[in-house]
Amino acid sequence: MPAMMRRRHALSLLALLPWRGVAHADDTGGDPFRSLQWPDLKREFFGSAPVVFDERVQVRAPAFAEDPMNVPVSVAALGLPDIESIVVFVDRNPIRKVLEYQPLAALASVGLRFKLEQASPVRAAARTKDGVWHVGGTLVDSSGGGCTVAGATRKDGSWSQTLGQVSGKLFPGSPIAQAQGSSGASRLRVRVMHPMDTGLVGGIPAFYVNRLSVRDAAGRELLRLATFEPVSENPVFSFDFPGRVAGGLRLVGTDNNGNRIDSRIE
Amino acid sequence: MKRLLVIALLAAGAALSQTAPKVDIARLDYGLAARALAPGVWVVEGANADFSPANGCNIINTGFIATGAGVIVVNTGPSKRYGEQLRALIERTVREPVVQVIHLNLHPDYFLGNQAFADVPRLATDSTRAGMAREAKAYEDNLYRLCGDWMKGTQAVLPSGTAMLGPLRVGGREMELREYRGHTDSDLVLVDKASGVVFAGGLVFAQRIPTTPHAQVGAWLGSLQSFSALPLKTLVPSHGPVRSDASAVGQTQRYLQWLDRRFTQAAEQGVEMNELLRAEVPAEFLGWAAFGTEYTRNVAHLYPRYEQAVLGGGKAKP
């Protein structure tokens, strides 16, 4: 797949710009978005591990960010077997990494909202058991400003009264799993109250949730999440499970100041 | 999605053919034209579309009313240039001076033409005045980005006074200002008694997806219910074609009722925004102007409140 894409790009560039060499066509390393940041991103996130562009990693977001502080992104790689980890990152954000997700007992899908500083490719990379990173993405246009503006609860000071509060709900049925033809799946949606300060607003240090796990009634970890500054204020996450999940779930985690999150999801 | 956009654009084009101004981008000329709706009452129609450089970001219907003791202007458009061209058009059309501007709500194309009306009283409700002051900077930035050169030199000039609700008598004309809410916190409607022309502002959208950055759906539907009792001969919505009946009120009601049901149901099923954006939409609404962009904005503005109501821990109502 990547070799094919590279070849296609090289050919189309040659057709359009016959005076340019093949080497020039490779400046973005075969990136379908032709992002000049891609070679650096690839090195930063994956080192020397094998990386392929793969349409089975679906990244969905609106074409433009109506609210750059809250851009919804949904990632699903349900057609890929044995996914150990998913990373979501944004090429042109000042802080690129949004989250790392280990689905453990959950499906390889996650939904959330994030802050977008300017128009950019938004990508997800899923690592399969064989160590290969499969990369998908989508483009989101934006008027800008998402990471360098204070959130609403930071502005009005109300964040301190709700810090760490969790609300959520289990839903019988998962729209994404149903769309892919698998019934019997279920969805969990949770919201954590937190200002998620990026540290890029004058006078407000970075203050964000950095770790979250969902545990079942027996304390078994069902999924694990590392979250970073670009996740939106008072984040809402969607997770999917292959079957029904028994009640009594807990959301457990921390923020970068050491505050604990530990709450039963009703 | 692309297909939907095409449908929406075609529909916008159909509505455009009767009334769209002839825009000259090279000269930054909006091609504004005044159409008489009744003796002394004119509408200046914008494109039924979304903001774009191709239409000069002129998507609003403004208007003016001659009273015998001066002209009352209803909204001043999206830019300094629009304001100037509107004022020149009024002077060409009526041999009376402009004596007053009325802003029907706080949205940018209701007042960013104010530089051309800096010498006359400009009135809005207190809530709208406060909202304009709060949002003016963001409006300027956003419209510069969306519309480019059309916005050159535009700076927000705020209203100069507070509009009084109820009967409004100027010269020989009896009008009435009514305040509703739901599209924004304060939605003014101007009724011209003799002609039955109603400037409905942002409360009613004709053949166009409603805009919702400040909307409260429940309050809006309540307002439309009482609004529909108003006797009217001609309805001028801020966006979409002028109607000689209340059909556009019904359109707006149907859309908001559908949206409320759909968003409630989606939130109860655990649907997230990107899934909602891709879910099926009734054909009637797909055919309205600006569907491709405005529905995406509707979801971004309103869906989080519905989610919150289901997930708990919040007190906001849609």
Image (spheres, helix red, strand yellow):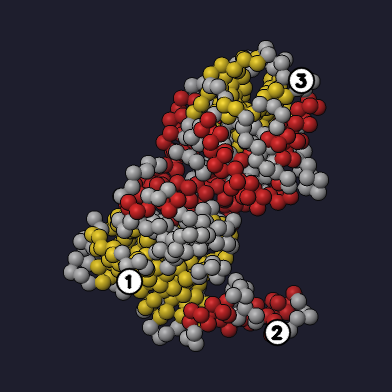
Q: Position of residue B184 (x, y in %)?
A: 50, 36
Chain ID of residue with mark 3: B
Q: Of the residues under marks 1 and 2, which one precedes in the sequence?
A: 2
Q: CA distance from mark 1 to mark 2?
A: 43 Å
- Residue type indicated by callout 1: Arg
Disc 1 target residue: A224
Q: Position of residue B250 (x, y in %)?
A: 50, 32
Q: Nearer the viewer, mark 1 or mark 2?
A: 1
Q: Give the farthest residue toward the front.
A: A203
- Residue type indicated by callout 2: Val
Q: Position of residue B303 (x, y in %)?
A: 43, 49
Residue B84 seen in the current view: yes
Q: Do the residues bearing badges 3 and 2 touch, measured as CB atoms within 8 Å?
A: no
User: Secondary structure under badge 1?
Assistant: strand
Q: Are marks 1 and 3 on the same chain?
A: no
User: Secondary structure under badge 2?
Assistant: helix
Which circle marks residue A22 in the picture? Answer: 2
Disc 3 target residue: B96
Q: Residues within 10 Å of mark 2 (few under 14, many from 20)?
A: some
Q: Residues within 10 Å of mark 3 (few under 14, many from 20)?
A: some
Q: Residue at x 47, y 64 (%)?
A: A199
Q: Residues within 10 Å of mark 1 (few under 14, many from 20)?
A: many
Chain ID of residue with mark 2: A
- Residue type indicated by callout 3: Glu
Q: Are marks 1 and 2 on the same chain?
A: yes
User: Secondary structure under badge 3?
Assistant: loop
Q: CA distance from mark 1 to mark 3?
A: 71 Å
